[in-house]
Amino acid sequence: MVEHLIVFNAEASPEEVREMVRKAREVLLQIPGVCGLRYGEALSEGARYRYWLSVLFEGPEVVSFYRDHPLHVEFANRVFRPMAKDRITTDYLVMTEVLCGS
């Protein structure tokens, strides 16, 4: 599995960011090879980045497919990037995962 992680600040209210995430879920989960999406908000008001969004891919081969997929390109260019100009994006190969209760 690959985790496409984006930490970002938004030129929008928290409610507008949550609506963007709802749209992300609606659009991005349609892309073949995308198997999940997670989102969070910093607990600390002073955090360098206020939000994070994670898109989970079935494997490394999905990274370039996702990057060029029309649904992703449209969503990123029209919805996400205008709102989240201050961002860092990195793809990580998931090596270990331990969940609560495991």
Image: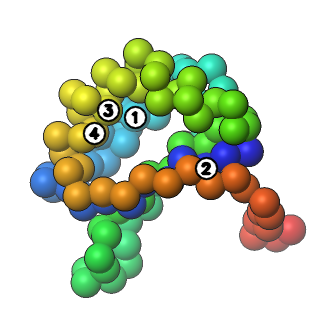
How many angstroms separate mark 3 from mark 2 (CA)? 17 Å
How many angstroms separate mark 3 from mark 1 (CA)? 9 Å
Residue 38 seen from this side: no
Q: Residue at x 64, y 30 (%)?
A: 62
The mark that comes first in sequence, 3 or 2, is: 2
Indicate the quadrant where residue 37 lies: top right
Position of residue 56 measured from the top left corner of the image (x, y, whole percent): 61, 43
| Element at label 1 | helix
How many angstroms separate mark 4 from mark 2 (CA)? 18 Å
| Circle 1/circle 2 CB separation < 8 Å | no
How many angstroms separate mark 4 from mark 1 (CA)? 8 Å
How many angstroms separate mark 3 from mark 4 (CA)? 5 Å
The mark that comes first in sequence, 1 or 2, is: 2
Residue denoted by label 1: 24
Which of discs 1 and 2 lies nearer the camera? The answer is 2
How many angstroms separate mark 1 from mark 2 (CA)? 15 Å
Q: Residues within 10 Å of mark 1 (few under 14, many from 20)?
A: many
Q: How is the image coloured?
A: rainbow
Residue denoted by label 3: 76
| Element at label 3 | helix
Indicate the quadrant where residue 46 lies: bottom left
Residue denoted by label 2: 3
Mark 3: amino acid: Ala
Q: Relative to 39, does residue 58 appear above or below in the rendering?
A: above
Mark 1: amino acid: Ala
Q: Residues within 10 Å of mark 2 (few under 14, many from 20)?
A: many
| Circle 3/circle 4 CB separation < 8 Å | yes
Please state which of residues 39 and 64 is positioned toward the viewer in this rendering: 64
Q: Residue at x 31, y 48 (%)?
A: 18
Residue 100 seen from this side: yes
- Look at the image and tell me in which quarter the N terminus lies: top right
Position of residue 34 measured from the top left corner of the image (x, y, whole percent): 61, 31
